[in-house]
Image (tube, grey):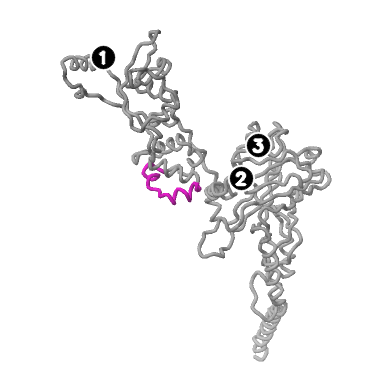
Amino acid sequence: MAWALKLPLADEVIESGLVQDFDASLSGIGQELGAGAYSMSDVLALPIFKQEESSLPSENENKILPFQYVLCTATSPAVKLHEETLTYLNQGQSYEIRMLDNRKLGELPELNSKLVKSIFRVVFHDRRLQYTEHQQLEGWRWNRPGDRILDIDVPMSVGIIDPRANPTQLNTVEFLWDPSKRTSVFIQVHCISTEFTMRKHGGEKGVPFRIQIDTFKENENGEYTEHLHSASCQIKVFKPKGADRKQKTDREKMEKRTPQEKEKYQPSYETTILTECSPWPEITYVPNAPSPGFNSSHNSFSIGEGNGSPNHQPEPPAPIIDVSSPMTSVQNLLPTSTPQEAQQWLHRNRFAAFSRLFTNFSGADLLKLTRDDVIQICGPADGIRLFNALKGRVVRPRLTIYVCQESQQLREHQQQKHENGEQGNGAFYVYHAIYLEELTSLELTEKLAQLFNISPHQINQIYKQGPTGIHVLISDEMIQNFQDESCFVLDTMKAETNDSYHIILK
């Protein structure tokens, strides 16, 4: 009986010891992390977990990273641990990016003595702006005509070959380079982060951008389409000297923090290393199409449009508009116009650059836009032009004259009344309006020929009947002295040749 009572006592002792050991192990973890509360991310950062993590097979363990890109600018000290670095740049200032060959001996031997092609892009970091990136960049283009978002400072760059900047891709530049030689490219970013924020009460927080570099090698056809490596980094762009002030402000804020708070932030590194990322969305390469470059003496290496973030789906190409359709005879856009007819109207009136923005707009949709709406979408210059075209505003002509062709029947009727002593003011004439802009005899000749459905070459001369019945040859100076809304009766006389006429203005 006594022996039977010892078993539960022994179990209680063993269980008590296990609980004490478990509590001791937890207290040890607590001592390592400090007296304060700890998070799971801090626990996973302990050496034991790091060793377990390092022992796991990595997906990129066997992947070759042939290149490394280094932006020679310090990172911000106000970035928390486990977050991506952030680098501040000044608008328009040249910054060096070193292109480093990171291959080990024997890796990718096909690149030896070969050129590769790198494409630089400045894109949005926020997913919210990535979905509207095309519209954002188009709006920037029309607010800053003639400017680019990204440029290469060619005189300062080293080792780059055939640098190019496509005028339709303001945020993209490209060049060739030899990995075996020293290569440094100096870039300039001309847009600032606050240009893409909603204006409210001032002091808006600027949006972050990304600098992405995609590198390609030649394929069998000599086209640079085989992807090798892609990397990117996060940046913010300030007005000149604004990046220096922001860096100083972040540094002063970090100095005021306690040592415990500082441990939650990364140190400021002297340079920014671009980290590997997904390649740019696949684009249609056009190797034979010319691409305007900084130096036109080299052959072209061009690509199709690529304005969009990796998460931004490429928009479908603009539809091909047949301007020879019956709709072309309509000058003003009608509320009943379909989206296809609205696209035709945009192309005919030199608004093809905005056809993609108004893809699904019908005539009624376009006509409902206010002046401010159109200016915000298209910019000041083209916005005003589009608004005037939508409202059908016609510019008043410089000179308007009214003409009537005197028929043989009317002439005989007037002569008969004159012989009978009757007044001839009762004759009925139908006049046509002619609008002149250039005020030249050639313009008048063309308008008269169009009015009476004859060829301009059939009108030999145009005269004006003088005070004593003389015929005065009409010149440009005479037309410029016509009074506006003058009325003329035209008398046509056969010239020496059977197919031409003399026209007399009475």
Residue 80, by quadrant, is bottom right
Most distant residue in the bottom direction: 2
Please identify the quadrant where the C terminus is shown.
Answer: top left
Q: Main secondary structure of the magenta part?
A: helix
Kindly identify the amino acid type of the residue bearing the numbered disc 2: Leu
- Return the x and y of residue 61 as percentages of the image width and height: 73, 53
Dot 3 falls on a residue whose secondary structure is: loop
**Nearest to N terminus: mark 3 or mark 1:** 3
> Where 258 falls versus 500 (above or below)?
below
Q: Which residue is mark 3?
A: 292
Closer mark to the observer between disc 1 and disc 2: 1
Percent coordinates x, y for residue 254 in the rendering: 70, 72
Can residue 64 be seen here? The reply is no
The mark that comes first in sequence, 3 or 2, is 2
Residue position marked by numbered label 2 in the rendering: 170
Q: What span is in magenta?
A: 361-380
Say if 328 sits above or below 103 in the image.
above
Say which element carries label 1.
Answer: helix
